[in-house]
Amino acid sequence: MDWLNNTFTLLAASQLALLGLFFLYHYGKDKLGLLLVFFCLCLMAYLVSRSTLIDSGAVSYIARRLANITPALLWVIAFKLFTDGRRIHPAVWVLVVVYLVARAPLSIYTPTDEFRQAWRWGVYVMPQVVMLGFCLHAIHLAFTGISSDLVEQRRRVRVTFVISMGILLAILTANGFLRYAAPVFEFVRIDYPGMVPGVFFSGYVLFGALAFNVINFQLRSGAADLIISADDDPGLHTAATPKPQVEVDPAVVEAIGNIMEQERLYARMGLTIGDLANALSMQEYRLRRVINQQMHYRNFNQFLNQYRIEEASLRIRDTDTPISSIALDVGYASLSSFNKAFKDAHGVTPTEYRNRNLTLLDSLNIEGSA
């Protein structure tokens, strides 16, 4: 079986190398492009570490350390690709560093019987839990927001890349967790069936990478927009402007603006792009293209927030209506989601925004009376 696994590993590595070179040549100056190159390298290292192609202890150790980075790297790629207007929290980077440091002593140090249990928890079990969480959350990011995603190419890539690779890495991490957790949970009987044959993973990656290469070359023009725009500064309304695929129709854009502003459709809680398409008697796919390619929004929630935050800002500044009431009136389901969207737009919370304007108004009144 080793010869078959090694053959699939070499073929899969060749496809990953081709994919990595493609990203390096075309998008090597973009952060997401470099992340994709590094991901291909780490996934190649994982496959090689599970084969019998290398005998050197030092090379094997380096390959395993690169392989350990793969789940976290997949999550970072998913975050940058599928979330608009958000930054990665510093705590995530701390978690990644702690995980890598915890796994670094693996196969170098053999603990004594006294510390063997704690060693398994710290080096095997808990890091596996952390990486499993990264894998599952990467899949979650791909699913969450797919209905509000306005970028057609990105909607296709979600399933093709993150779901296929995310499921693979989740299985691998869960597999490793069961392997290492069984001796730790001595009070629980875990019938562990053993490691899944390596040929399964190498074959899976081979056909997955091959399929992604085919789709990637088909979407080459769209891939550039996705990778470059992922490096844009977060904001309520992204400046990335995709190439139009539909004929510019000012009447449609005007109709969208009228129904949103005059009928305040944005204030309807839970409004979806399908609801807006029905209100306009328009096909949903066409509405997605118009909002994305003519109005330059990548996400339907960004589109709604533009209207909601604009009205909320006026009411917070010019009235003494409770902020919680304003949040509900403009369409937010909770005060926390409103506060986050407002701070993303203005850099301050609604309360700070109101206090700042009250202070400015008081100073103007004092100057006027003087």
Image (tube, rainbow, N blue to C red):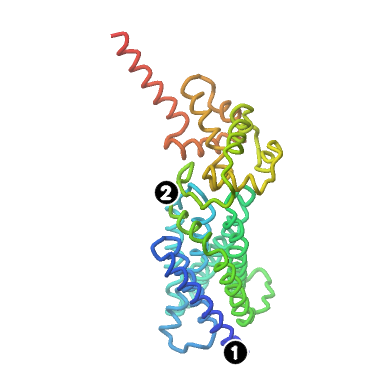
What residue lies at 59% left-to-right and 84% top-to-bottom?
8
* Secondary structure beneath label 2: loop
Q: Amino acid at mark 2?
A: Asp
What residue lies at 32% left-to-right and 11% top-to-bottom?
368
Report the residue marked by disc 2. 233
Circle nearer the N terminus (2, 1): 1
The quarter of the picture where residue 56 lies is bottom left
Look at the picture and state if 325 lies above or below 174.
above
Q: Is residue 63 left or right of residue 307?
A: left
Q: Residue 340: x and y, percent? A: 50, 39
* Secondary structure beneath label 1: helix
Look at the picture and state if 30 lies above or below 327.
below
Q: Residue 173: x and y, percent? A: 58, 69
The quarter of the picture where residue 216 lies is bottom right
**Residue 115 visible within the image:** no
Q: Is residue 145 left or right of residue 116?
A: right
Report the residue marked by disc 1. 2
Q: Residue 246: x and y, percent? A: 59, 49
Of 6 and 172, nearer the camera is: 6
Q: Amino acid at mark 1?
A: Asp
Q: Residue 250: x and y, percent? A: 57, 38
Q: Is residue 161 left or right of residue 123?
A: right
